[in-house]
Amino acid sequence: MADGRKLKMTIIILGALILAVLSIGAVEYTSQTGFCNSCHEMNKAFAGWDTGVHQTIHCYECHTDEGIIDKVKVKANGLREVYIHLTQDVNMDEVEAEVPESRCLKCHDMSQQEKYGERVVNFHKQHEQFKFDCLTCHKSAGHTKDYFNGFENEACKQCHLPEKQAG
């Protein structure tokens, strides 16, 4: 009887260890930047990132917060995305990732005049009163070289074009 319990416990422990190793391996594999391009829907975004100014920044720097809980949330969302990929047609032009300003500000402290120059720092100060988040003006940051298009940017047109102001 005791031998049967030992065998059962050994099988349970080995099964748990195998599951843990496979889970850690899967998390590591799916955490590689190249994995983000494994779905055809991501080709355009990945190509933009790969040739843009953020190409040395890992996807997680912008698309997740730090910590194990947030990593688990991202992985759970990734499973949802795999399900959608397998069951639906996805139009990436309609998909918008949430990137809170706090993630941008980890690298981009817009008060650093020596890094960004007086013009850029002053421009950001002028717009602080409107409480824009970074993506209001830099919507495609991270996925293209043209991360800011001046007054061609739709957000700028809302305030700065005369016909918008006259209406």
Image (cartoon, grey):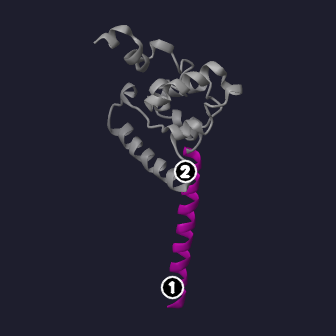
| 7, 79: nearer the viewer | 79
| 14, 129: nearer the viewer | 129
- Quarter of the image where the C terminus is located: top left
Q: Is residue 64 above or below residue 122?
A: below
Q: Which residue is mark 1?
A: 4
Would residue 35 be seen by someone viewing this image from the given angle? no
Would residue 105 be seen by someone viewing this image from the given angle? yes
- Label at residue 121: none
Q: Which residue is mark 2?
A: 26
Horizontal and vertical percent for residue 14?
A: 56, 70
| 166, 85: nearer the viewer | 166
Q: Is residue 30 above or below residue 4?
A: above
Q: Which residues are magenta?
A: 1-30
State the count of labels.
Answer: 2
Q: Amino acid at mark 2?
A: Ala
Horizontal and vertical percent for residue 94?
A: 36, 28
Q: Amino acid at mark 1?
A: Gly
Q: CA distance from mark 1 to mark 2?
A: 33 Å
Q: Is residue 139 above or below residue 106?
A: above
Label 1 crowd bin: few (<14), some (14–19), many (20+), radius 10 Å? few
Magenta span contains residue 89: no
Q: Left of 84 or right of it: where is 45?
A: right
Q: Left of 104 or right of it: where is 117?
A: right
Task: Determine the residue located farthest toward the bottom in the rendered image.
Answer: 1
Q: Quadrant of residue 117?
A: top right
Horizontal and vertical percent for residue 90?
A: 36, 31
Magenta span contains residue 3: yes
Task: Determine the residue located farthest toward the top in the rendered image.
Answer: 163
Q: Secondary structure at mark 2?
A: helix
Numbered disc in front, either 1 or 2: 2
| 29, 130: nearer the viewer | 130
Q: Secondary structure at mark 1?
A: helix
